[in-house]
Amino acid sequence: MTSPDTHPILVLGATGKTGSRIAARLREMGLPVRAGSRSATPAFDWEAPDTWGAALHGVRAVYVSYQPDLAVPTALATVTAFFTLARELGVKQLVLLSGRGEREAEQAEDALRASGADWTILRAAWFAQNFSEGLMLEPLLEGELALPVAGVREPFIDVDDIAEIAVQALTTDRHRHQLYELTGPRSITFAQAVQEIAHASGQPMRYTTVPNEAYRAALGAAQTPPEVTALVMYLFETVLDGRNEQVTDGVQRALGRPARDFSEFARQAAAAGAWQTRLAA
């Protein structure tokens, strides 16, 4: 009989912040990994359901990271259909990356629970790595991060903590039917986060609060696609209203250790050179 370990684990968003780390950890463990992306073979595209079957064929577990975000209007119907197909094709374990404070994300969680699969839900705070790998990196390299957020605090979560829990959930039964709300160990403002990054990197940086409409206009001037602008503004205007300031014990529950602090993230990212390449003035 074939060992279950010979069946691949499908990692959706395998080139993203969480997916890339999860795929790397699984490969380091010697486990077969199937990358779920439009550039992979077989290709996977959330907007092309006819690609899902080949990506799911023979798979025993899936890490589900929906792009661009579970908050978009079409997300719930899409992931519900995906969960149903995964179960029909014999997938045993589904691990969903979800978001805190998003009604739409919670609806996706409910759909996963109703799918009949073994499930684990990782309901994550904003990623610390957004400052070093994502939307906020380029402005920091230029020396100023301007966002439509004032004194709201966020318990930024280190993506490596998410990846560690996800790998365990994909490869063991210990996290079956568990929902983990994942935050860092303290809440800080965006201004405080930038101060910590400036200190860790030795680079001059500042944080500026701008009005919502000014930020929307800046996104438009940068030729940001309208659907991306709408999503970003939803997150800043709705989710970052103070509802997510509370710290949780999800990482401690899942891993038996405290979550990594933002200052540790900043030190490690600075040591790796995340903020050393400054754009020309």
Image (tube, rainbow, N blue to C red):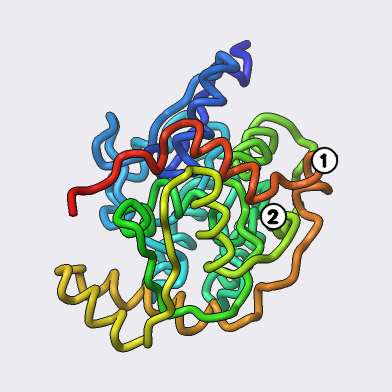
CA–CA distance between discs 1 and 2?
A: 12 Å
Q: Residues within 10 Å of mark 1 (few under 14, many from 20)?
A: few
Q: Quadrant of the C terminus?
A: bottom left
Instruction: Examine the rendering and report whether any part of residue 76 can be seen.
Output: no
- Residue at image position (55%, 17%) is 28
Is 153 in front, or is 177? 153
Q: Callout 2: 10 Å neighbours few (<14), some, many (20+)?
A: many
Residue 239 at x, y percent in the picture: 54, 78
Q: What mark, if any, has residue 182 been given in the picture?
A: none
Q: Residue 184 shows which numbered tag?
A: 2
Residue type highlighted by circle 1: Arg
Residue 133 shown left or right of residue 262 in the figure: left
**Rendered image: mark on residue 257:** 1
Asked whether the viewer can see residue 32, the reply is yes
What secondary structure is marked by label 1? loop
Q: Position of residue 95 (x, y in %)?
A: 60, 47
Q: Amino acid at mark 2?
A: Gly
Reply above or below: 239 against 46.
below
Name the image quarter holding residue 4. Answer: top right
Q: Can you say whether 270 is above or below 116 in the image? A: above
Residue found at x 76% / y 43%:
175
Residue 214 point in image, percent of width and height = 29, 85
Where is residue 94? Give x, y as percent.
59, 46
Contact between marks 1 and 2 (CB within 8 A): the answer is: no
In this view of the protein, which residue sits in the foreground, 76 or 53?
76
Determine the residue positioned at 42% across, 48% down.
203
Q: Secondary structure at mark 2?
A: loop
Name the residue: 75% across, 64% down: 247
Q: Foreground residue, 238 or 170?
A: 238
* Horizontal side of residue 156 vs 226, given as left or right: right
